[in-house]
Image (cartoon, rainbow, N blue to C red):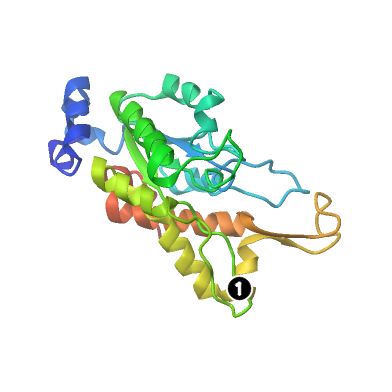
Amino acid sequence: MTHRNMNRLPRWIAMVFLLTGVAHLPSDATAAEAITIFMIGDSTMADKAVIPENPERGWGQLLSLYFNSNVTVDNHAAGGRSSKNFRSEGRWDVVLQRIRPGDFVIIQFGHNDEKSDQARHTDPFGTYTDNLRRYAKEASELGAIPILATPVVRRNFDVEGVLQPTHGDYPDAVRKLANEIEVPLLEMTHRSRELIERLGPERSKQLFIWTVPGEYSRFPTGNSDNTHFNALGATRMCDLVVAEIQEKIPELAVHLKTRR
């Protein structure tokens, strides 16, 4: 990482690089250095089985297709996980053992933090914020750059065709924390909402697991899922992620494939 790019980083992350020696890499190492993007989150991000009977894909599953060969995407997101039980189940410990200086960690929770059960529920400006702060701090202490992401929206249109929010204060909590601790923010709530609103109630179904009876053996009677994506939906979410990276994270954007 060059000193010019160092100037774009928050002070506390830049200090980690100085202490770990990452800042002293040759200036031509930026594009060639092997890095890993770790991903932690829920089912909307997670890898799904690539089998004929399963149309579901998480957006993190496709992200590696957008990056050069020196980038590895290590996706640890899992269905049903919140910022609370992702840690309590030991999943974060696995990530911590693999992080190396110069890596990135994308953190996106919220869908399951909203749930009422004790194992998963968090308060937006309380335990949820505390959990995200701790993930970011621990990643940065290992020389990685934490990236917070607001949760993608659900396809929740009312009878008048107006898309209704379902995430409460969780997106605002992420925005506030990212600003406070000076880490990059992927604004996926706004971007996914704009996309789904633009498509409208009918066309937006094409991004989600809406199936007819007999189309997939996993859903013999059909399915109407407004949360989880198919391959097209996951691809469109990745497009939004890449747009955010290009706009906000030049140190990572340099590793994106050149679009023709």
Relative horizontal placement of residue 250, taking residue 155 as reference (left or right): left
Q: Determine crowd level at label 1: few under 14, some 14-19, many 20+ residues with C-alpha closer than 10 A.
A: few
Residue located at (26% from left, 36% from top): 30
* Quadrant position of residue 126: top left
Counting the numbered discs, the total is 1
Q: Which residue is mark 1?
A: 158
- Say which of 123 and 148 sits in front: 123
Question: Hey, what amino acid is under mark 1?
Answer: Asp
Q: Quadrant of the N terminus?
A: top left
Whole-percent x, y for residue 26 in the image: 18, 29
Relative horizontal placement of residue 215, taking residue 159 as reference (left or right): right
Q: Is residue 58 visible?
A: yes
- In the image, residue 190 sits, relative to residue 102, either above or below, namely below
Whole-percent x, y for residue 61 in the image: 56, 44
Relative horizontal placement of residue 259, taking residue 195 as reference (left or right): left
Residue located at (39% from left, 37% from top): 132
Q: Is residue 25 visible?
A: no
Which residue is situated farthest in the bottom direction here?
160
Residue located at (48% from left, 37% from top): 83
Whole-percent x, y for residue 80 in the image: 61, 40
* Quadrant position of residue 38: top left
- In the image, residue 216 sits, relative to residue 164, either above or below, namely above
- Say which of 36 and 10 sits in front: 10
Residue located at (40% from left, 57% from top): 259
Q: Quadrant of the C terminus?
A: bottom left
* Quadrant position of residue 134: top left
SS of the residue under disc 1: loop
Whole-percent x, y for residue 253 in the image: 32, 48
- In the image, residue 194 sits, relative to residue 94, either above or below, namely below
